[in-house]
Amino acid sequence: MRSGLAAALMGIGGILATFGATVFVISLFTRMNSWRPQLPTMMSVATGMLVVGGLMFVAGFLLNRVGRREPSRA
């Protein structure tokens, strides 16, 4: 149960962080175009997605580390 939750948090967090990074890069390129009025909204969405995605990914990673019963011998 715990490993499924950890995998879900890491997967969804990774997707959100990647989406936020993509929106951030697109917003950097729109500084030169006629989409300038949308720039603050795009930067807010990008920052929010990066933060939420990063937090979800870290929470899933930490939950995965705490959920192990014995240390792995890699």
Image: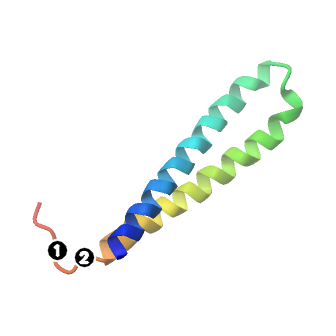
Identify the residue under disc 1: 71
Left or right: where does residue 39 sit relative to residue 69? Answer: right
For label 1, count other residues whose C-alpha is less than 10 Å away and answer few (under 14), some (14-19) or many (20+): few
What's the amino acid at mark 2?
A: Arg
Residue visible at 85% across and 28% down in the picture = 36
Residue 22: image quadrant is: top right
Q: Nearer the viewer, residue 12 or 53?
A: 12
Would you call the spot at circle 2 few (<14 residues within 10 Å), some (14-19), or many (20 or more)? Answer: few
Image location (x, y in percent) of residue 71: 16, 74
- Reading the image, the residue beneath label 2 is 68
Q: What amino acid is labelled 1 in the image?
A: Pro
Q: Residue furthest left?
A: 73
**Which SS class for mark 2?**
loop
Residue 61 position in % (x across, y down): 38, 64
Image position, residue 46 (x, y; %) = 67, 44
- Quadrant containing the C terminus is bottom left
**Position in image of residue 49 (x %, y %):** 63, 51
Which corner quadrant holds the N terminus?
bottom left
Q: On screen, 31 above or below 40?
A: above
Q: Are marks 1 and 2 in contact (CB under 8 Å)?
A: yes
Secondary structure beneath disc 1?
Answer: loop
Q: Residue at x 32, y 77 (%)?
A: 66
Q: Residue furthest right?
A: 37
Mark 1–mark 2 distance (CA, rounded to whole Å): 7 Å
Q: Is residue 40 left or right of residue 18?
A: right
Q: Give the answer, above or below, for where 24 lies relative to 51.
A: above
